[in-house]
Image (spheres, coloured by chain):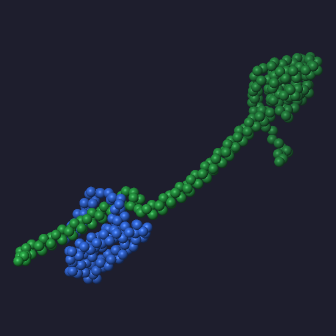
Chain colours: A blue, B green
Amino acid sequence: MIPAIALVAGIVLGLVLRPTVPSGLEPYLPIAVVAALDAVFGGVRARLDRIFDAKVFVVSFISNVLVAALIVFLGDKLGVGSQLSTAVVVVLGIRIFGNAAAIRRHLFRA
Amino acid sequence: MNRPSPQMKAKGRWHGRHGSAALIGILTLALGFAIAVQVHAHSSGDSLSGLREDDLIGILDNQTARADRLRQQIAGLQDNLRQLQSSGDRSAAARQQATEQEQALGILLGTLPATGPGVTVTITDPDAKLIGEDLLDVVEELRGAGAEAIQFGTVRVSTSTAFTGGNGKVDVDGTELTAPYRVVAIGDAKTLDTALNIPGGVAATVRAAGGELSVSEQRSVTIKVTRTLPTAKYAKPAH
């Protein structure tokens, strides 16, 4: 319950404050958001599987974001930034779909 | 001895549960915040600022190539404009030339009124001895002296003007005129005067017939009488 409320509160906060993204963070923010979404979906699935662990969630969340940002950073340095960020988005998207399917099976038994 | 009491253990677990819940809340809050910020940054503001260097270079190349194409188009269109303007100038010049030619021909053919320096000639014929040929001589003399437009009585003289009859009545192009005859001619007044009064010329002929030919040079005479343009029945322009 708390995470859902916090998520909504964060969105509202972002809409109200309307901060500008620092130019150094611009390439990383969308990837970090997708990585964090992956962690959140994984957490929801674990919760429904009754194997949720707060520590695992926090660590996976932070490491997901950091690794995604690192990959994009490395890709930028190697000159394949756009391709690598596409790859990260594809992989994370597949994981999100998998988790979403598991959540769906739990919720609708289908 | 330092084993934690059950109370402390419970307190630690309580603290840990709440701490991780708070941590999860902060993380999801940050996620929501990041989503809102990213959506806002992506939808508003210029889309270029979020792009990578390679993409920007590609866009710049595209824009440069497009600008080059547009510059070429501009040069081509300016060429077209110049051509059209020069052809427009040419056609305007041709039209002006045609108008001038038409006016010159109209004056010479008698289809347009004319004005300019010239002479007024009055020919009296009290004895009614002058015949058409004598009056034609007057016209011929004026033409020979460079008269560009001639009005005889009430008739505009042209290339096909004919003088018939005599004895006080002359038929000019179907119009019957009686003495005294009044002739207006446009040309160099001095030359016209000289030509008419040349010894043995038309003035002498008129005097011999008992009449009088008087010429008055004028700075400006106007011939308002015009004639219709005869249509060629047989002749056609040959190229």
Task: Using residue A26 as the reference point, say whether residue B233 is left or right of it.
Answer: right
Front in this rendered view, residue B237 or A25: A25
| Front one among B12 and A107 | B12
Give the quadrant of the N terminus of chain B. bottom left
Q: Give the image location of residue A64, x and y in percent.
A: 30, 72
User: Is A82 on the left or on the right of B132, as rendered?
Assistant: left
Closer to the camera in the image, B6 or B85: B6
Number of numbered discs: 0
**Could you tell me which residue is drawn at 75 percent across and 27 percent down?**
B115
- Could you tell me which residue is drawn at 79 percent across and 23 percent down? B118
Q: Residue furthest bottom?
A: A109
Q: Picture quarter containing residue A35?
A: bottom left
Picture coordinates of residue A71, whole percent (x, y): 36, 70
Q: Is residue A64 above or below residue B232?
A: below
Q: Residue furthest front?
A: B1
Query: Which residue is painted at 59% across and 54% down in the image?
Result: B72
Using the rendered image of the protein, determine whether residue A39 is visible from the camera's viewpoint: yes
Rendered view: B173 above or below A68: above
Write down the quadrant of residue A55 in the picture: bottom left
Query: Percent x, y for residue A31?
Result: 34, 68
Question: Could you say where residue A73 lies in the image, as x and y percent from the top left?
Answer: 37, 67
Which residue is depicted at the point 43% across and 62% down? B53
The one of A95 and A66 positioned closer to us in this rendering: A66
Q: Quadrant of residue B195?
A: top right
